[in-house]
Image: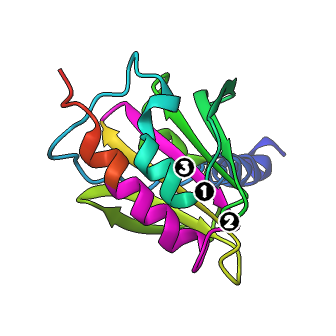
Amino acid sequence: MSVRLLPVAVAFSCVAMLAGCSAEEPAPPKVPPIESPKGLVGLDPCALVDGTAQASLGLGTGVPGTDELGANCKWSGRSPKTVQLTAYTSGAGLSDLTKKSNPDASRVRLEGYPALETFTTGGQFCRYDVGVAEEQAIVATMDGGRPDSCTALQKLLTTVLSDLPESK
């Protein structure tokens, strides 16, 4: 009888091993290297949007805060209704954000920096996660921008990214 059970035991072991292998999650896609890293550590997110940008977008004074991603600043206005910038400096930057991103997010580049773009149909809401250094990213959201939130947020991020200091 023990001779008949051996093939069954071997088959069961193989199935158990294969089941364990298939349960592994696939590795997230690699984030492209960041060629001209910028530094966010120690910066006040409210200082990332200057008075000219605030005025051109019709935004009020930025209100500092924090959330699960880090220090942020939120501005309110009419169009856009809200803008928020978060300095993500406590993890692996865009690599972390890629793992947690919306499956509909698109990989794009903003001013040469790798980014994820997530938006709603009709362009009311837009989010960019922009890798500015290996372990740092800006998470930017806009609700109610004109002509659409992604176009308006891209314009704002162009200024923000150019004004960031070089990483040390």
- Say which element carries label 3: strand
Kind of residue at disc 2: Ser
Q: Is residue 55 magenta?
A: no
Q: Which residue is mark 3?
A: 140
Mark toward the start of the polypeptide (1 vs 2)? 1
Residue 102 visible to the viewer: yes
Q: Which residues are magenta?
A: 134-158
- Label 3 crowd bin: few (<14), some (14–19), many (20+), radius 10 Å: many
- How far apart are the two marked residues, 3 and 2, measured between alpha carbons? 16 Å
Instruction: Residue under label 1, please give it.
Output: 58
- Amino acid at circle 3: Ala
Q: Position of residue 111 (x, y in %)?
A: 26, 60
Residue 86, label in figure: none
Crowd around label 1: few <14 · some 14–19 · many ≥20 (10 Å): some
Residue at the (25%, 47%) spot, across then down: 162
Rendering coords of residue 108 (x, y %): 38, 68
Which percent across, then down, holds residue 83?
62, 50
Tell me if 57 is positioned left or right of 95 in this view: right
Query: Is residue 49 rendered to the left or right of residue 142?
Result: left
Residue 79 is marked as 2
Q: Position of residue 131 (x, y in %)?
A: 37, 45
Question: How much space separates mark 1 and mark 2, taking CA atoms?
Answer: 7 Å
Point out the frontmost of discs 1 and 2. Answer: 1
